[in-house]
Amino acid sequence: MTERRAGWLRVIATIDKFTDVFSAVASGIILVLVLIVTYEVAARYLFHAPTRWAFDMTYMIYGTFFMLGAAYALRRGAHIRTDLLWAMLSPRWRAAIDFTAYVLFFFPAISLLFLTSVDDAWHSWVIGERSEQSSWRPYLFIFKSMMPLALFLLLVQGIAELLKSWYAILRNEPYAEEEKIEI
């Protein structure tokens, strides 16, 4: 294997490892969600004292968990794919379709969403935006900042997936480390 090819395979491995580690750390958010929901249920039904903040915290934490999981889902192949005829195609053709879809659709769309979400999050920080969903009215800028972070992680993982597609085009076999989730 040439040094150049080995370099881009290292890029794939590094991005995949980064996504795995970041996702494992971010999955700790679900523990916070479980604790908040448990506290709210106990406060509401055992002590008849519901909180003002639990509703807002649960949708913000679950939304953050969901958004930060997008890059991991992309890495594991858990995003929706149309399977019509997919299994009948050679690895090279599947990779060519993936490569084309990443270049024509994925990167332009995610880049646009990223830039828009950065503006939205920045505006939220500047004005000190607050939620109108409850009387607690929590600040929204931290929650809105999760969207550009999630989209950035998705873009980075998209680079690895694009390189995996290129690998499969060149070799007519899927990238060796490929572990996809069947739904």
Image (cartoon, rainbow, N blue to C red):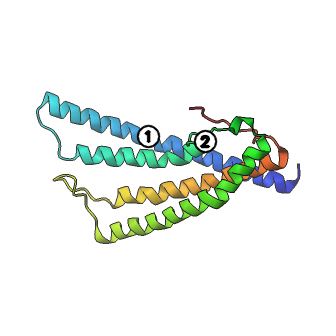
CA separation, marks 2 and 1?
A: 32 Å
| Secondary-structure class at tag 2 | loop
The 10 Å Cα crowd at callout 1, few under 14, some 14 to 19, many 20 or more, is few
Q: Check the image and report above or below for 178 versus 160.
A: above
Give percent across and percent down for residue 27.
46, 40
- Quadrant, the C terminus: top right
Give percent across and percent down for residue 62.
37, 44
Q: Which image quarter: residue 141? A: bottom left
Left/right placement of residue 118 relative to residue 168 reads: left
Give percent across and percent down for residue 135.
16, 53
* Residue sitting at x 60%, y 42%: 81
The 10 Å Cα crowd at callout 2, few under 14, some 14 to 19, many 20 or more, is few
Residue that carries the numbered disc 2 in the rendered image: 82
Q: Can residue 37 be seen in this view?
A: yes
* Residue sitting at x 20%, y 30%: 42
Residue that carries the numbered disc 1 in the rendered image: 28
Q: Check the image and report above or below for 33 versus 63.
A: above
Residue type, label 2: Thr
Give percent across and percent down for residue 101.
65, 54
* Residue sitting at x 83%, y 49%: 170
Q: Check the image and report above or below for 164 versus 116.
A: above
Q: Is residue 21 visible?
A: no
* Residue sitting at x 43%, y 45%: 65
Q: Earlier in the sequence, mark 2 or mark 1?
A: 1
Q: Check the image and report above or below for 156 versus 37.
A: below
Foreground of the two, 140 or 26: 140
Foreground of the two, 154 or 82: 82
